[in-house]
Image (tube, helix red, strand yellow):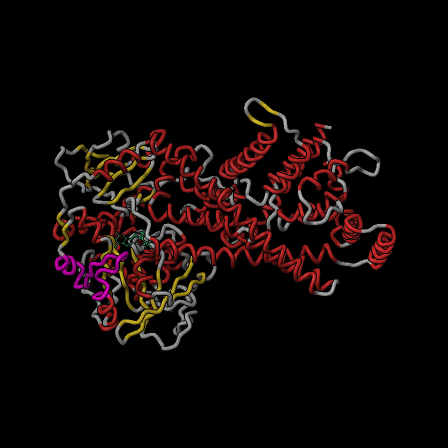
Amino acid sequence: MATRVETAVSVDSVTIHRRAAGTVAVVGNPNAGKSSVFNRLTGLRQSTANYPGVTVERRVGRGVFGKTSLDLVDLPGTYSLSPNSTDERIAVDVLFGRVTGTRRPEALLAVIDATRLYQGLYLLQQLVELGRPMIVALTMTDAAQRQGLRIDYAALQEALGGVPVYPVVATTGRGFPALNEALGRLLETPAPRVVEHWAELRKVAAQLAERWHVGGVDLHPIEVERLLIDAGTQTAGTQLQEDLAAARKQLFGGAPPLAVEARRRYAWVRATLARVETPGSLVVSRGAALLEWINRPWPATALFVLTMALVFQAVFAWAKPFMDLIDAGISAIGAAIGAWLPPGALNSFVVDGAIAGVGSVIVFLPQILILFLFIIVMEDTGYLARAAFLVDRAMRVVGLSGQSVIPLLSSFACAVPAIMATRVIPNRRDRIATILAAPFMTCSARLPVYALLIAAFVPVRPVGIFNLQGLVLFGLYVIGILGGVGTALLLRRSVLRGENPTFILALPEFRMPNLQTVGLKLLDRVRVFLKRAGTVIFAVAVVVWALAYFPRSAAVDEHRTQARTVAAATLTGAELTKRYAAIDNEASAEHLAQSWLGRAGHVVEPVFRPLGWDWRVSAAVIAGFPAREVVVAVLGTIYAVGGDADEQTLAGQLTAARHPDGSLVFTLPMVLGLLLFYAWCLQCAATLAVIRRETNSWGWPVFAWTYMTALGYTGALLIYQLGS
Amino acid sequence: MSDLKPGDRVRIDTIDTADPAVQRLMVLGLVEGAELKFLRSSLGGDPLEFRIYGASISLRRAQAQHFHVSQLGAHGNPG
Ligand SMILES: Nc1nc2c(ncn2[C@@H]2O[C@H](COP(=O)(O)OP(=O)(O)O)[C@@H](O)[C@H]2O)c(=O)[nH]1
């Protein structure tokens, strides 16, 4: 195959002290306990990076087993060698050595859930046929025991052509000494005897492999088998395609190859299961009865609403004190360093650029941490899948599936982790529709802008049992949801049209969350977030600072010095301090007015004039395009109340602002339009960067930005023009 | 297989395999001869949840209707 790249030498990013004796792939069904096993075997000697071209994380770890050290590659969970999602494709590609930079694993460690042997055996049979040294770690043996399930390990080993089977409990470490020892001998373990189960397929595949080999295409017969069965999933030359089509016709007639394979293999699985497993008498415990009740539609709905309310409460209320603390800490550090450095460009860069930039990254951390914590716990307990099951019907109305609900809910905190969470959605069209709907949800960075404008322009007036201000805020959330849902619907009806998404999901059993698993996953995701979003947010902060700082005008500084001298001559004490502050703020505002940013505001003002904005608002909006949360600070500077001024002061300035012709800038239609603009506009470089990574294209982020900006602009225009 | 009562135990007799989603389900073990227990339907009657030899799988009615099943007595034992 033309696209195939084999690297003979491992370029693993693990710091290699000693050369590993070999690479072992850790393979298994999703949720079988693979990461738990992997973590236990490698400890913290592991590293994560991305596979080239996709956002699937590549986890590699070094394990030392007796005298042997091995590189373990934790592959994404899969049910078979017929990939159904990006994750599964990577797992299969790594197994066949088709991924650049990752060595073809010499041996396999299969991680199989003892309570779900039925599906486990299917994958095991396929793995055995790869003909590499292999052992099985049979996890969840504690749960199997509780269910009264009895497994004949010797019979299982025999059925797998001699592959050794090690019962373990990945959460407690039971059975690991024996597993460790077996891993030490793994490379010398003979490959399993392949149980001939489909001679005809084997023969045809071998013939094709031979023929293609002569033509210069080197494929293992098993790879050819996969090409034969997973029709249309591979891009190969036309000659190969013709050969495959002919062979398929001969082997399967008109039947779908995948269906034929499933039938044959599961026939073997059922026969094997009957020999190796004795089902227990199902005792219904009280816990099970409760879980059963909780799973009924209405209790489940109530639980879902409660859970989501708790998540929101946690993300917004619990994180608040920490965010305030970080904010205060950053300001204090900035002030201290600002006082210590001589005034000038360097001072401003360090305080307003670098420190403020770092601050704007870590101020989000409390929320992100709490959000991730909830998502991971929901994942680990199996609740995430339950929630998806529950809301699937409702999501179908907008052309999505239940699996979109958690990403969409997460984006009320921040679209970046939300878009990262869309990876669980196997259907690409579904996934992209979800990615494009996510940035519409009211994220926490929009809140300061909403709070400012609402406090300034929406009167505190009771409406029924509610307050008008609260209602407007609620309305903005609704507008965001409508925008997102409408977009998903529109996309699914046009460019992303396709058959209704399916909803095939394995629903894991409820499990108590494991502290260590949760902790490790949390660290991992936060690290990825900091890398993905943190770097962008920081860079943006520095760039915006530079645009607002340069070029410096000597005239403004001179004017400021003069004003200060005059003030010092006439005032004293607190009066003087106040006057100084006012002078400084005015100087900042004048500097900003003739900075690149201020000039840009003047340049684009004509574009925004139909929306009722003056050059100041235009400049603030431009500054907000890479990161919407900076808008409030820019407005603060531009209206000469200082970047750190509280809402009240700034709100006062805004209500008084006038156009050159004397009319008020912030009229009600203009404010409502501005709010709508914020609700719908994609003003976040970090989100764009994440969309670009997750869709692996420039087209989608460019589309998302253009579309959302156009939508926000049009909305604001209509409201202003109709309202005035 | 799309109109069952919770608790019903069934065996799959025949499958219309044309839908790729149906083929995915077959890879997950919903093949002819497999025995399942219908657990519940979700809010609004869809999707459905089945238990198959110890594992739970959910699918929509649209896919379920491609599986033709016969009811088992109370003694069927799909895990
Ligand atoms: N009772 C029990 N739970 C386990 C065992 N192995 C893993 N788990 C839990 O099963 C869940 C899924 O494990 P994880 O390692 O994330 O599975 P993966 O999706 O295959 O990587 C986690 O909550 C683990 O704590 C085990 O042997 N026994």
Q: Nearer the viewer, residue A272 or A519?
A: A519
Identify the image quadrant of residue A508: top left
Residue B32: x %, y % from top left: 21, 41
- The picture places residue A666, in percent across and down from the top left corner, at 73, 35
Residue B60 showing in the rendered view: yes
Horizontally, residue A5 falls left or right of residue A153, namely right
Q: Is residue A722 above or below residue A226?
A: above
Q: Is residue A168 within the magenta segment?
A: yes
> In what quadrant of the picture does the C terminus of chain A appear?
top right
Q: State which region is magenta.
A: A153-179
- Identify the residue at horizontal 14%, vertical 45% (top origin): A280
Along the viewing direction, whichever of A633 and A52 lies nearer the viewer: A633
Q: Position of residue A569 (x, y in %)?
A: 87, 54
Residue A669 colored in magenta in the image: no
Q: Give the quarter of the figure containing the N terminus of chain A.
A: bottom left
Q: Nearer the viewer, residue A488 or A417?
A: A417
